[in-house]
Image: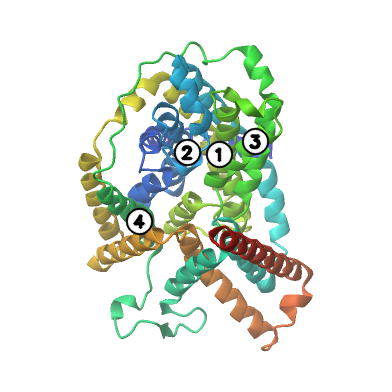
Amino acid sequence: MLQLILTGFSEVVSPLTVLLIAGGVLLGIVFGSMPGLSATMAIALCLPMTYGMVPINGMALLVGLYIGGISGGLVAAILLRIPGTPSSVATCFDGYPLAAKGQAGKALGVGIFFSFLGTIFGVLVLMLVSPLLARFALKFSFYEYFAVGVFSMTMMAGLISGSIVKGLASGAIGLLFAMIGAAPIDGLPRLTFGFHALDGGFDILPVLIGLFAISEILKSARERNAKKPTLLQDFKIKGFGFTFAEFRSQIFNFFRSAVIGTGIGILPGIGGGTSNILAYSAAKNGSKYPEKFGTGIIDGIVASESANNATIGGALVPLLTLGIPGDAATALLLGGLTIHGLNPGPLLFDKEAELVYGIFAICLIANLMMLLFEYGGIKVFARILLVPKYILMPIIMVLCVVGAYGLNSRLFDVWAILLFGVLAYVLEKFSFPLTPIILGFILGPMIETNLRRGLIASKGSYLPFLTHPISAVFLAISLIVIILAARKEIRAAKKDGKESS
């Protein structure tokens, strides 16, 4: 493995690759620090730019955006009490109160440093677990891949939202759009309604841009009269912002939160938006002074930022080993790989080992750059928060349209991003989660193709899907998840009914 790691670093030491990593991290921090923007939106916006790059350079830019964007959310969370990204929601709980006490530098320093450590932890787990999981996944046949796809859909739908019905409905919408165009295996056109532009189906890039960028622009337009952020207070960071004694007191909190973040990242479709809140809750429940949480203590910042950044490495595990994105941002990274003709999965470790370990190296280099950039330019990033959205959003809209058109040079893709943007906007108005849509869109062809191949191999029998041990285990877990989530929702509905009566 050491030889492969060294090979990976040799893949990314060229000046252009390092420059792309640095540019990605900087832009990611800007997007992450601005409420309404996110790492996901940054990746969606820059994905078309990677089309003409070699794969390692394209991934350098996208991974840099991912790491910078997730960490950048702490800036607005601490200074304005507005989470820059969903991954920084729990950072507001103690970060802003600590900043309000005149210790904004300390709050930012703690957040930045433990973001760095959290990412290191997640990437180390990624490097250790991924090769083992990939070797295990090589034993998978049609039946196992079908079961894993179903398992991913149910886990995502049951855990990402408070309503399993809405989660499954969003996943079904994604599956429906994935079925438009030529069917797998036999190539028969489906759901095209006579429009030849739909014969090839929807490309993943317009879908991603529409769901995660256009919808945000529409939401910003709706909130044009929202309250403007207050002026930023001045602050200073001395050293790392905290003492060695404070660091030592947070070691157990860090490891517990990093483990939670990595584990949540590995589960498909959940991500840092959940892990930071779970880690914060675990830190509060396990604390000797839970009453102090929410008043401005570093324990809450450590828990949130360690977990959400550890989720980065965890979310890349299923992406690289099984071709299943761990969250919305890694769904976009999957799009970046497929643009270059690469199919994430266990064979990627055999056929493109240099690229895989190059991605590991990119993660580590980007994380180090994130640490340096945020400590060195934190005041600059903080000032960016004051740029009006009416200046930013039109620029982003133009870039989205250019990026969609530039993929295949057809206006159909421009209409597609508008379609998915409006769809996402409407669904979010009714509290339907978006991540299941893109996960359904990505997993749909995998589930259908392996289902049909399995039925062909078994001559129409569904029994092998239940008799193969690995397949049976994943399908059983999927059923259990749905039953437990349904019971939870029924109980919540009964409780709400009693309270209203």
Q: Residues within 10 Å of mark 1 (few under 14, many from 20)?
A: many
| Viewer-side label of 3, 2 | 3
Q: Which residue is mark 1?
A: 308
Q: Position of residue 264 (x, y in %)?
A: 62, 47
Identity, as a three-letter code, of the amino acid under mark 2: Ile
User: Which secondary structure, mark 2?
Assistant: helix
Badge 1 or badge 3: first in the primary sequence: 3
Badge 3 or badge 2: first in the primary sequence: 2
Identity, as a three-letter code, of the amino acid under mark 3: Ser
Dots 2, 1 in contact, CB < 8 A: yes
Q: Which residue is mark 4?
A: 209
> Left or right: 456 with respect to 377?
right
Q: Position of residue 228 (x, y in %)?
A: 28, 35
Q: Is residue 115 above or below residue 347?
A: above
Q: Position of residue 116 (x, y in %)?
A: 55, 29
| Residue 224, picture quadrant | top left
Q: Which residue is mark 2?
A: 70
Task: Give the spatial CA distance, label 2 vs label 1.
Answer: 7 Å
Dots 2, 4 in contact, CB < 8 A: no
